[in-house]
Image (tube, rainbow, N blue to C red):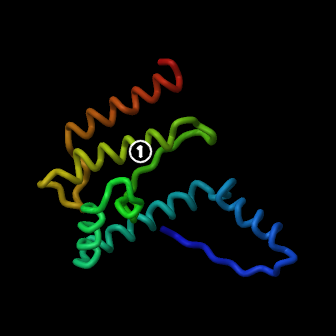
Amino acid sequence: MTNYFFDVNTDCFEEALDRFAQFFIKPLMSANATMREIKAVDSENQKNLLSDAWRMNQLQKHLSLESHPYHKFSIGTKFFVVCEPGTQHMEALLKVVYELYTDYVLKNPFYEMEMPIRFELFDINLTQAVQKDRVALLGR
C-alpha cells in the first residue's frame, strides 16, 4: 500500500485536496512514464524475491483470511492491459488474469519467480478469458 501525505494551509485546503485528487482521477502519465512505473514495480518485486523476511511475510499473507486486505499481493507483477481510455471491464479482466496467474503459475511447484510464464493451462485459460471479455465488449 502506498500512502501519500501533504501539508497545506487550512485556507487552501479544498483547492489543494482537489488538485491532489486529480492526480488519481485524471493522471497525466505519458506512455513512457507509465512503462517506467511498471518496470519500477517489477524491479521492486524482483529485489524482494531474494529476501527471506519478504518470503516469510508472503507466507503469512497467504495463510491469512482471503477476504482480508492483508491477503492480497503487496507488490505488483508486470501484467498490464493496453486499451483505450474509458474501456469498460478492465478491472474485472485484470482480476481474472491475476486469478489465473495465481492458480496456474504461482501454485505450480516447478515455477520459480524469475522464470518466464510458460504454462499451457495458463495460456489456454487466459486466451479464453480475453476472448470472453472481447465478446462481451464488442459482440464478436
Q: Position of residue 112 (x, y in %)?
A: 19, 60
Q: How crowded is mark 1: few (under 14 residues within 10 Å), some or many (20 or more)?
A: few
Residue at the extreme right of the image, as rendered: 11
Q: How many marks?
A: 1
Give the quarter of the image for residue 85: top right
Determine the residue positioned at 80% across, 72% down.
13
Question: Observer-nearest residue: 38 or 71?
Answer: 71
Say which element carries label 1.
helix
Q: Which corner quadrant of the image does residue 132 belong to?
A: top left
Q: Give above or below for 43 relative to 35.
A: below
- Which one is nearer the viewer's eye here, 102 or 131? 102
Q: Which residue is drawn at 24% across and 66% down?
A: 59
Give coordinates of residue 52: x percent, y percent.
22, 77
Q: Residue furthest top?
A: 140
Q: Nearer the viewer, residue 27 or 61?
A: 61
In the depicted structure, whether residue 120 falls above or below residue 18: above
| Residue at the disc numbered 1 | 95
Q: Is residue 111 above or below residue 48?
A: above
Left or right side of 7 for 92: left
Q: Which residue is drawn at 45% across and 67% down?
A: 40
Q: Position of residue 117 (x, y in %)?
A: 25, 49
Q: Name the residue type under label 1.
A: Lys
| Residue at position x 37%, y 59% in the image | 72
Task: Say left or right for 117 vs 13.
Answer: left
Instruction: Residue 98: give x, y in percent of width and height.
Output: 36, 48
Taking the image as shown, residue 46 lies to the left or right of residue 104, namely: right
Q: Residue furthest left?
A: 110
